[in-house]
Amino acid sequence: MYGLEQQILRTDASGMPLEWIDFREVVRLHCLGQLAYAWGNTLFELHGGVNARTHQRSSIEVSSIVATRGPRHAVDKLRAGYLPPLNNRALFRRDDHFCLYCGDRFPARRLSRDHVRPLSKGGRDHWSNVVTACLRCNGHKAGRTPEQAGMELLAIPFVPTHPEYIFLQGRNVLADQMELLRAHFPRTSPLHDRQPRN
């Protein structure tokens, strides 16, 4: 059984992933008539009050994925210039909590954002210039480039697409949600083989 805290993946009517929402937003969208259809696994059924005329109790089945009508907010996020917001949680998940210098995996509290080309040397705080580094490696590298510090970068940083970013922002991503997200990842995405992590 899924808890009420389980995230639901919202898409537009064509199936393009838009965002994560909770059950309250699903109910709101249902009441506004904006749900086009639901798919994926049924997570739970919510029961409401009893109709005075029909004496029927209202209920809504909440599925793991819901498609909505209305403006396609994803259109802007599919354009070539779209850049998802950079935050440490998504960065650490992009790099699967591995330090991209020593290759060890760490909990988030022992990780940091490292600028491959340091800010002091003209580097930018941008997805393509940042990697996950353990505190020790980041301290050793300091304000130098990896070459200057004698450190090898184990992977090339990449800018996630919007569907990849949605995955990176997710908590407890379910198998059916992951299947839909993967269908929208670029063919070369390193996230294809990633297993959902809580």
Image: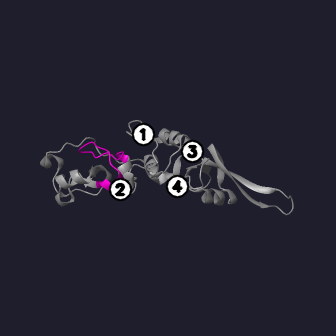
Q: Are marks 2 and 1 in contact (CB under 8 Å)?
A: no
How far apart are the alpha carbons under marks 2 and 4? 24 Å
Q: Residue under circle 3?
A: 15
- x, y percent for residue 26: 63, 56
Q: First in sequence: mark 2 or mark 4?
A: 4
> Do the residues under discs 4 and 3 have CB atoms within 8 angstroms?
no
Sequence-wise, which precedes: disc 4 or disc 1?
Answer: 4
Location of residue 48 (image quadrant): bottom right
As shown in the figure, which amino acid type bears the numbered disc 4? His
- Mark 3 or 2: in front is 2
Q: As rendered, which of 28 and 36 lies closer to the eye?
A: 28
Label 1 SS:
loop
Identify which amino acid the numbered label 1 is placed on.
Answer: Arg
- How many C-alpha atoms fall within 10 Å of the one at disc 1: few (<14), some, or many (≥20)? few
Q: Is residue 96 part of the magenta span, yes or no? A: yes
Question: Magenta segment range?
Answer: 94-112
Residue shown at 37%/47% (left/top)? 94
**CA separation in Å, label 1 and label 3:** 21 Å
Name the residue tied to disc 4.
73
- Mark 3 to mark 2: distance in Å? 28 Å
* Residue beneath the point at 82% across and 61% down: 51
